[in-house]
Image (cartoon, grey):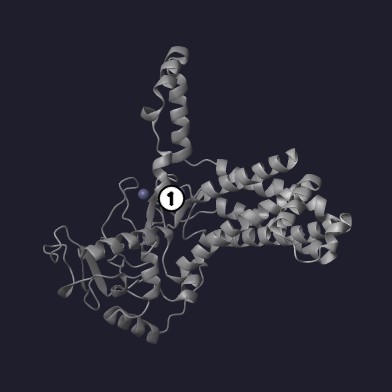
Amino acid sequence: MGTVRNVAIAVLVISFLTFVAFFGRLPALRSLASVDMASYPGGFRRIDQKLTDGRLSAWIGRLASTLWNDRHPLVMIFFFLLLFVSEYMFLPSAWSFLTTSRKIISGILVILPYTFLWISAASDPGYITPANHSHKMTLYPYDFTVFYPGQACHTCHLLKPARSKHCSICKHCISKMDHHCIFINNCVGRGNQHWFLLLLLTTAIVTTWGTYIGLSVLSDIVRTEIPAWNALGRGFTWAQYFHIWAWTLQEKTRLGAATLLAFLTSPLVWGLLGYHIYLIWAGTTTNESMKWSDWQAEMSDGYVFRRSLPENRQKDTNIESPWTSWPVESQQIILRTEDGMPPRGPEAIGTGDWQRVWKLRDVENLYDLGFWDNLKDVFGLRYGVRPEQRAQHRLSADNGNTHTASRDSSGER
Ligand SMILES: [Zn+2]
Ligand SMILES: [Zn+2]
């Protein structure tokens, strides 16, 4: 039973590491990782002070800071090895049991995640540079809700285009920044988000396919090698089922472990893919969804106000591009105030009375053109918004009753 225990522990540890790498950059887990030198056990520092003059703790501190704050391919290598070693364990052991069509499908599927991993990692996620800045400014209009004109990046010293964000790891502002992904050691932005989606999709298909053919080959092996279990028929008890798995991990360690790993990791990959498809459906990004949920909190406190922007508003071309390739313009401005009173002062552009906003459904998401057009935007295709749709979009801004479900849910994260 020693092998079984070791394999089970190894598979669980790898699944756990994958889980941490997936979700490790969540704000909730951030505090865990930002442990600094001050919180090292005092004993360790005193010993290190004696032995290495404190150089070891300084080195560990620098290493931790590099791993956390700079680009490095460590997690990408882990991801690559996870795929490669599992496939190396899986395919040779399963190959002779596979039909020709399964061999062909497996052969094609196996190369796809590597291809999209490489393209996602190597491609420009949408770096904003002085040379391309004016072009990046024309991609999206400011929505005066999540993105306002006239805000400069303190590091890049460039005006931030709508939907962009500075990545402290890549040290660049990124166009339509989604998030920095440690699995591809790159940002996910306008330039590569479609490659990232294809990476998630093909990885999800590979892990599911691996689980499916792994289980099918293993159950064939179990049936031929242990006829006694065959006689049990279909009604296995849990105990018998675990017994079969234990036997499988003992006798067919490579195939069993790789199948189990595929089975445990595939829900994670499907979950992440589903989340990104949901974001596209809602017309938002990981970065923007966090801003929307901040708005949700401010709104329920009653500190948020909305009013209309004038039709055919004159843009200040020093801070806004006079036109963008996005088919709609914002019809609203949303502001929060410190005192819960309607905004006053020079920043308060727009016309009409300020209305207090209590719910996300009462504001328009300018970047939501509907699922298919949002998806076309992700894949860099032309979205064909027809004039009547523009009119409808404007209407929805006025009475706030469409594009609502997405907003509500994005705020609830
Ligand atoms: Zn920047
Ligand atoms: Zn980045």
**Crowding at mark 1 (Cα within 10 Å: few <14, some 14-19, many 20+):** few
Residue 179 drawn at (x, y percent): 45, 54
Of 159 and 28, the residue lying toward us: 28
Q: Which residue extends farthest top?
A: 50
Residue 135 visible within the image: yes
Q: Position of residue 366 (x, y in %)?
A: 35, 72
In the rendered image, which residue does mark 1 sit on? 26
Which quarter of the figure is the N terminus placed in?
Answer: top right
Asked whether 214 or 328 is in front, the reply is: 214
- Residue 287 vertical placement versus 354 (above, below): above
Q: Residue at x 74, y 62 (%)?
A: 236
Q: Is residue 278 left or right of residue 83?
A: left
Left or right of 232 in this view: 271: left
Residue at x 81%, y 62% (from the top left corner): 232
Amino acid residing under circle 1: Leu
- Residue most extreme to the left: 345
Residue 145 place in picture, x, y as percent: 28, 66
The reply, left or right, for residue 233 in relation to residue 136 is right
Badge 1 element: loop
Q: Nearer the viewer, residue 45 or 243?
A: 243
Residue 367 at least partly seen: no
Question: What residue lies at 86% left-to-right and 57% top-to-bottom?
Answer: 228
Which residue occupies 32% across, 50% down?
A: 153
Q: Nearer the viewer, residue 291 or 190?
A: 291
Ligand 2 within 8 Å of disc 1? The answer is no
